[in-house]
Image (tube, grey):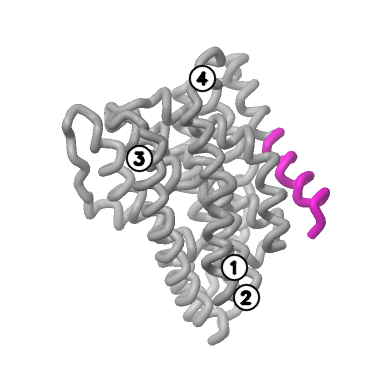
Amino acid sequence: MDFVTVFDQILLLFLLVLAGYGARRLDVFDDKTTSGLCSLLVKVTLPALIISSMMVPFSPERLTACGEMLVISVVFYAISLVVAWELPRILKAPETERGVYGFILMFSNTAFMGFPVVEAIFGKEALFYTAVFNLPFNLLVFSIGIIMLKWGAAGEKGRFDPKILLNPGIVSVIIGLILFVTSMRPPLPVAGALESLGSLTTPLSMIVVGAMLARINPAEVFAGWRVYAVTGARLLLMPVIVWAVLVPFVHDPYLLGVPVIMAAMPAAAFAAILAEECHTDTKLASQGVFLSTLFCVGTIPFVALLVA
């Protein structure tokens, strides 16, 4: 895939983000509606997309690829954790900000932006690998992620909550794996409904991201130098490191391409949501989400040239 094609696909997604931003600024809908749409994405359309993307013909090769992708995902997050721990210290960030910076570095927007971007670059077949790759995210973001955010917040310490094992993302991957391994298929109307619901994920997720970014005061968006350094690391350093580690050992285009593209995603929208719940620096988290989402329209096409 050439640069212009990749750029056009990413620009299309970014224009959807701008549509959501403008709609929220013009009060087409409010924060309550935004929260409701976010819940709809997390609990309905994204699980439907995951399940429908995993309803592919079974083969031993694909099953082997599942195991390999899980191993690669673990390596990916191990690399991310090291960078998330060390870079804020190198930047001499205040103690109360290190957790937010660490979260931004470790957790990219693999769900809301990752799935549509991977589909735009590699096609729908790659979503199967994306769903498998994304499984550790659901475990780590609500365990290590919360610990990071709470570390400097009023002396609190995060705890692992076993209830996260029942979140819709993990459940949908398990259902998808069962359908894949057993070659079972739901009735045609159910399969059609899953595909239709899943198709809403891309435009709706971009609109929701834009609406969430609209909550930031424009005058505060571009302040501070450390957030730019962390944004640059999030969008360029992370995918280059992941590519350099994997390319000598991984030759399958999906097993290499999906992790690199996921590493190039902007900061997870969860950063702002969880920062607010953890009573830490919500403004800094929102700023990191906004800037990384803004600049990714220019960086993702370049990263895609490494693997597309």
Report which residue position mark 4 lands on. 223
Q: From which residue to which does the magenta span run? A: 1-15
Tell me the element at label 4: loop
| 168 left or right, relative to 122 | left
Tell me the element at label 1: helix
Residue 59 in the image: state x and y as whole percent.
57, 84
Dot 2 and dot 1 residues touching (CB under 8 Å) = yes
**Residue 274 seen in the figure:** no
Report which residue position mark 1 lands on. 256
Residue type highlighted by circle 1: Leu
Q: Quadrant of residue 194?
A: bottom right
Mark sitting on residue 112 = none
Residue type highlighted by circle 2: Asp
Task: Give 148 or 172, whichever is nearer the viewer.
Answer: 148
Mark sitting on residue 252 = 2
Between marks 3 and 4, how big is the CA–CA gap?
20 Å
Residue 229 in the image: state x and y as whole percent.
51, 36
Q: Nearer the viewer, mark 4 or mark 1?
A: 4
